[in-house]
């Protein structure tokens, strides 16, 4: 049975300096609250993996918690740049980070390979592309059956995967509804899995069994964190806070303003009260 823990305790138990961590989510269900708790606990030298790094990775990198970023897209969705990521790459502020870029397809395959216990992922891709010139982890293999040249990338096996979901049962079965990314694959590839949820229910009886994305025995800890995906959305619970993404572009553009925002909204917030609320231009805590 998966443990039910406060988020502070789960992060303290399963995450440590120097680990490889995936905070996965796609469009919605992005685990902001968990990333903020990692920042509060001062966990550092992380290798972060995600198909589509957005604001939480900008914040982790801007706070100096990251050594390396493995990704297939990076940006503030619908807005533009991740300014803290760019400052780290171009100006080594607050520290230089290593980057390893892949295509979406390759990184998704790499998560699947990790979940299957395979050493690498094989895909028909990258032919004619130049990305392998800057990423030595993109290599070629010859199919032993057809002689075709195929691309190969290392499997992804995080020390910890963190995701957000709508519900978990008391036993620890996790239900995810709406748009899916690679949450399931990222969880099954990891040594430990932390799931923050909007609510814990007694059972998931009445839900079609194919809708239970993760059974209890694949999950290390379940943490009840209502609103834990804000400012992204959680299907069926709350919408996307578009104003927050626009505001982040202004906040993150200036180092001092970024630091002040992080102190007010993350560092100086009690972890028992979700600190992922972003103040919009109107000053409302969303």
Image (tube, rainbow, N blue to C red):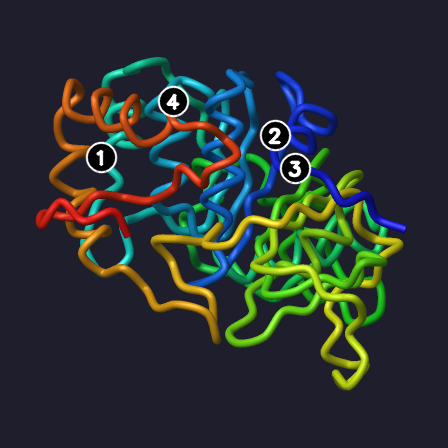
Query: Counting other residues with Cα less than 10 Å from the Cα at mark 2, is it few (<14), some (14-19), or many (20 or more)?
Result: some
Does residue 184 sit above or below 219 in this rendering? below
Q: Distance from label 2 to label 3 (Cα)?
A: 5 Å
| Residue, disc 3 | 6
Element at badge 2? helix
Element at badge 4? helix
- Which of the two discs, 4 and 1, sits closer to the camera? 4
In-front residue for pair 10/102: 10
The first of marks 4 and 1 along the sequence is 1
Residue 102 in picture, x, y percent from top left = 49, 48
Q: Distance from label 4 to label 3 (Cα)?
A: 17 Å
Q: Residue at x 62, y 37 (%)?
A: 7
| Residue, disc 1 | 83
| Residue, disc 2 | 8
Does residue 224 sit above or below 12 in this rendering? below
Q: Is residue 221 shown left or right of residue 134?
A: right
Q: Distance from label 1 to label 2 (Cα)?
A: 28 Å
Query: Counting other residues with Cα less than 10 Å from the Cα at mark 3, is it few (<14), some (14-19), or many (20 or more)?
Result: some
Q: Are marks 2 and 3 in contact (CB under 8 Å)?
A: yes
| Residue, disc 4 | 267
Element at badge 1? helix
Element at badge 3? loop
């Amino acid at each position: 049975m998966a443990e039910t823990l406060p988020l502070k305790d789960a992060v303290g138990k399963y995450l440590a300096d120097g680990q490889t961590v995936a905070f996965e989510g796609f469009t919605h269900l992005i685990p902001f609250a968990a990333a903020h708790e990692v920042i509060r606990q001062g966990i550092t030298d992380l290798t972060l993996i995600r198909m589509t790094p957005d604001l939480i990775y900008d914040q982790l990198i801007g706070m100096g918690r990251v050594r390396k970023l493995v990704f297939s897209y990076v940006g503030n969705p619908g807005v533009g740049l991740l300014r803290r990521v760019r400052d780290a790459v171009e100006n080594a502020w607050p520290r230089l980070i290593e980057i390893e870029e892949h295509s979406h397809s390759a990184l998704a395959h790499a998560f699947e390979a990790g979940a299957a216990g395979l050493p690498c992922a094989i895909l028909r891709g990258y032919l004619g592309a130049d990305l392998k010139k800057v990423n030595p982890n993109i290599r070629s293999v010859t199919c032993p059956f057809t002689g075709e040249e195929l691309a190969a990338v290392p499997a992804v096996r995080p020390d910890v995967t963190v995701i957000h979901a709508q519900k978990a049962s008391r036993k620890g079965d996790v239900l995810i509804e709406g748009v899916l990314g690679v949450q399931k694959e990222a969880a099954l590839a990891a040594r430990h899995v932390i799931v923050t949820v909007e609510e814990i229910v007694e059972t998931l009886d009445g839900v079609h069994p194919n809708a239970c994305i993760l059974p209890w025995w694949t999950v290390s800890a379940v943490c009840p964190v209502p609103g834990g995906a804000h400012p992204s959305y959680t299907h069926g619970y709350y919408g996307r806070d578009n104003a927050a993404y626009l505001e982040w572009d202004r906040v993150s553009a200036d180092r001092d303003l970024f630091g002040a925002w992080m102190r007010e909204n993350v560092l100086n917030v009690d972890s028992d009260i979700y600190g992922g609320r972003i103040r919009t231009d109107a000053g409302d805590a969303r």
